[in-house]
Image (cartoon, rainbow, N blue to C red):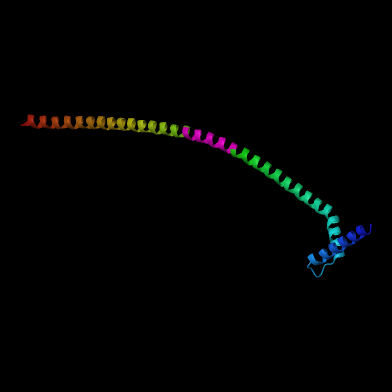
Amino acid sequence: MKKKWQLSLMTVVMYSLLLVISDHRAEAGFWENVYNGYEQFTNLPEEVNKLQQSYEQTMTELNNAKTNIESFQARNEELISQNQYLMEQNENLTTMVGQLQKAEEQRMMTQKRITVMVITAISLIVLYFLLIRVIRYRMRRHSRM
């Protein structure tokens, strides 16, 4: 029994000696370390609560970001479909403009032909009257001679 006490006493002395030797900080003592450890241990629930609040806030922000991403994707898909519709409408308008330009060219050609025919007809009529006058004038001069 005496040996057990000696062994226990030796163990406590060695443990105390190891604590003193291993701790190189001059300002902290053994009891201060124990108190700081206890204080840190009692502050753990607060830190856990802070971490939990931080986690919940992060999850809320993540959910908000997911919601924003989903709404942006929906808006993007809507804009893509609207863009496709507008492109089809643009193609239709382009073909319609081409048809209208062809119709305008044909109208201009027809108008030009009519104008040329009218000018030609008027010129022929004027030329006919001039030719008749010249012929009458010559016939009068020829008959007087």
Q: Depth check: give the residue in front, 44 or 56.
A: 44
Say left or right for 20 vs 87. right
Residues in magenta? Answer: 77-91
Q: Depth check: give the residue in front, 19 or 60.
A: 19
Which residue appears at 20% of the width and 29% of the height? 128
Dominant SS of magenta comes to helix
- Residue 108 horizontal/vertical position (percent): 35, 33
Say left or right for 31 vs 139. right
Say left or right for 71 vs 27. left
- In which quadrant of the rendered view does residue 47 lie? bottom right
Which residue appears at 17% of the width and 31% of the height? 131
Instruction: State which quarter of the image contains the C terminus.
Output: top left
Count of number-bearing discs: 0
Q: Depth check: give the residue in front, 145 or 122.
A: 122
Which residue appears at 50% of the width and 35% of the height? 87
Q: Is residue 85 magenta?
A: yes
Q: Depth check: give the residue in front, 19 or 133.
A: 19
- Residue 45 horizontal/vertical position (percent): 84, 52
Which residue appears at 20% of the width and 32% of the height? 127
Q: Is residue 97 magenta?
A: no
Residue at the farthest right position = 1
Residue at the farthest bottom position = 26
Instruction: State which quarter of the image contains the N terminus.
Output: bottom right
- Residue 114 horizontal/vertical position (percent): 31, 30
- In which quadrant of the rendered view does residue 103 lie? top left
